[in-house]
Structure formats: C-alpha cells, structure tokens
C-alpha cells in the first residue's frame, strides 16, 4: 500500500450521506443559485405532461456538487485539483443519496503527493446516480 505524507492510503474509503429525502425546495433553490430554470427541474406539469417524466428531477450539477462534498470534507476544497463525473440516473424528490470516495493511487509529483480517487453516489435503492474521478494535492 502506498502511503501519503498526511496518512491517506490506497484503498482507503470515505462515505457520506449527502441528503436524506431530497426536497423539491432544494431543487428549486439550486435552480435559483445556478440560474438553470429548465422546467424539467421546476415545473411539475411540464415535466409530466410535455416531457413525459414521472415528475421533476434534480439538476445533474446539483448531484455532482453534493457528491463533491465527500471529497472536500476529506481533503479540503483548496486541495482538489480535478473532479469529473458521469451522470448515470436521475435523482428524484424523496431520494436519499450516499457518496463514497476511494483512494485509487497516490503519486509523487514535483509539486508534492497527489491522490487519485474514484467516486460513486447511490440512491436509497443502491442504484448508481453518479460515478467519477478526482485528484487532490496532499500535504507533504
């Protein structure tokens, strides 16, 4: 196992419950904060009658942002170098989301050690809603 200067080890994981019972209010608040008022996320009638969805659903970037907390709570916001995700499934009002970050590798770079992570967020049924990767600079 590779060990970084601040104790992060390859294979180590962190899990975080991001939200329990996601409320529509939070989705609308995100719409306001982001400026993304797509009616798929804010207008029940449009989502169901026009678009054919069962209802409104969360913005992908809301889910990504919440997922990022498992990383920033672990290594801090200033250490995060990269973070990218793939959206796998929609997130609905009422969902509970849990994220897991796993250290895949730690490399020595000229600027100091960098940890590479895989991330995964699942809903209350265990279905993946987001997968991705991240890298963070570690304290020497």
Image (cartoon, rainbow, N blue to C red):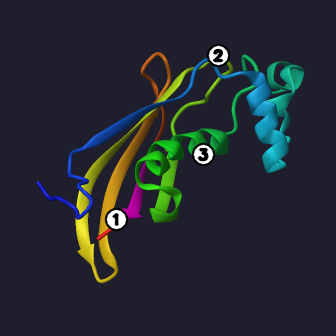
Instruction: Kindly identify which residue carries mark 3.
Output: 65
Eye-nearest disc, 1 or 3? 1
Q: Residue at x 41, y 38 (%)?
A: 120
**At 34% from the left edge and 67% from the top edge, which residue is drawn?**
139
**10 Å crowding of disc 1: few (<14), some (14-19), many (20+):** many
Q: Residue furthest toward the left?
A: 1
Q: Within 10 angstroms of label 3, few (less than 14), some, or many (20 or more) residues?
A: few
Q: Is residue 81 visible?
A: no
Describe the element under mark 2 as helix, strand or loop: loop
Asked if disc 1 and disc 2 are in contact, CB closer than 8 Å, the reply is no
Q: Residue 111: which quarter of the image?
A: bottom left
Earlier-in-chain disc, 1 versus 2? 2
Residue 16 image offset from top left, x and y in percent: 44, 32
Quadrant of the image occupied by residue 30: top right
In the picture, the quarter occupied by the C terminus is bottom left
Residue at mark 2: 94
Q: Are the residues tagged 3 and 2 within 8 Å (C-beta)?
A: no
Magenta-colored span: 132-138
Q: Point out the image quarter for the N terminus.
A: bottom left
Q: Is residue 46 left or right of residue 93?
A: right
Q: Secondary structure at mark 1?
A: loop
Indicate the secondary structure of the residue bearing disc 3.
Answer: helix
Q: Is residue 27 left or right of residue 8?
A: right
Between discs 1 and 3, the one toward the N terminus = 3
Question: Real-space Cα distance between discs 1 and 3?
Answer: 21 Å
Task: Tell me if residue 12 is in the magenta stretch.
Answer: no
């Amino acid at each position: 196992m590779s060990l970084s200067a601040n104790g992060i080890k390859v294979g180590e994981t962190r899990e975080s419950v991001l939200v329990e019972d996601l409320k529509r209010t939070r989705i609308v608040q995100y719409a306001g904060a982001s400026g993304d008022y797509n009616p798929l996320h804010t207008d029940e009638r449009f989502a169901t009658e026009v678009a054919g969805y069962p209802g409104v659903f969360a913005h992908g970037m809301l889910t990504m942002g919440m997922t990022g907390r498992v990383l920033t709570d672990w290594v801090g916001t200033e250490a995060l170098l990269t973070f990218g995700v793939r959206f796998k499934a929609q997130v609905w009002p009422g969902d509970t989301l849990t994220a897991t970050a796993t250290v895949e590798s730690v490399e020595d770079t000229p600027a100091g050690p960098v940890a590479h992570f895989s991330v995964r967020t699942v809903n209350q049924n265990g279905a993946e809603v987001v997968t991705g990767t991240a890298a963070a600079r570690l304290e020497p």
